[in-house]
Image: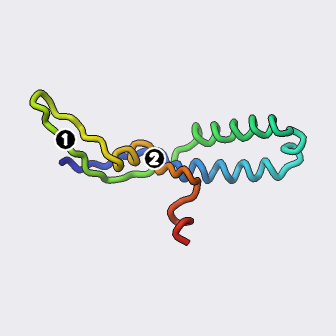
Amino acid sequence: TVNTEITSFSCTEILSQYNKKTDEYLSTPEALIDGPQGRLEKCNQILLDCITGNTATQSQSIPLTLINDGVSWKLQSNVQLGTALFGDFNISGSSEEESSE
């Protein structure tokens, strides 16, 4: 087992910025004028802008298990590795802090 620290993007920050910017947009007369299709396109563009403009990161220390198959060493995948690689993505859109309140 090898311990390592992996740094990845922060989904929490991306979703926070997205929620803030879409709330701002949806409270304007422009959003009403745009109609459903226009709002969808604008919100998609806001999400894309939040993803590409994100500079926030998160780091996580995780153990990596290496298995020798007789020819080479193979990395055994685990949930912690996936979480570290794909950021702090939370499908519900709420952070752990919000869910613990």
Residue 32 relative to residue 56: left or right: right
Please rate how many residues cluster around mark 1, counting C-alpha atoms within 10 Å: few if below 14, some from 14 to 19, many from 20. Answer: some
Task: Residue at 27% x, 48% y: name it.
Answer: 4
* Lower position in the chain sequence, tag 2 or tag 1: 1
Residue under numbered circle 2: 87
Residue under numbered circle 1: 66
Q: Which of marks 2 and 1 is in front?
A: 1
Quadrant of residue 42 in the image? Answer: top right
Residue 24 relative to residue 47: left or right: right
Quadrant of residue 77 in the image? Answer: top left
Query: In the image, what residue type sits under mark 1?
Result: Leu
Task: Residue at 63% x, 37% y: name it.
Answer: 48
Secondary structure at badge 1 equals strand
Q: Residue furthest top?
A: 71
Image spot of residue 60 (x, y percent): 36, 53
Query: In the image, what residue type sits under mark 2?
Result: Gly
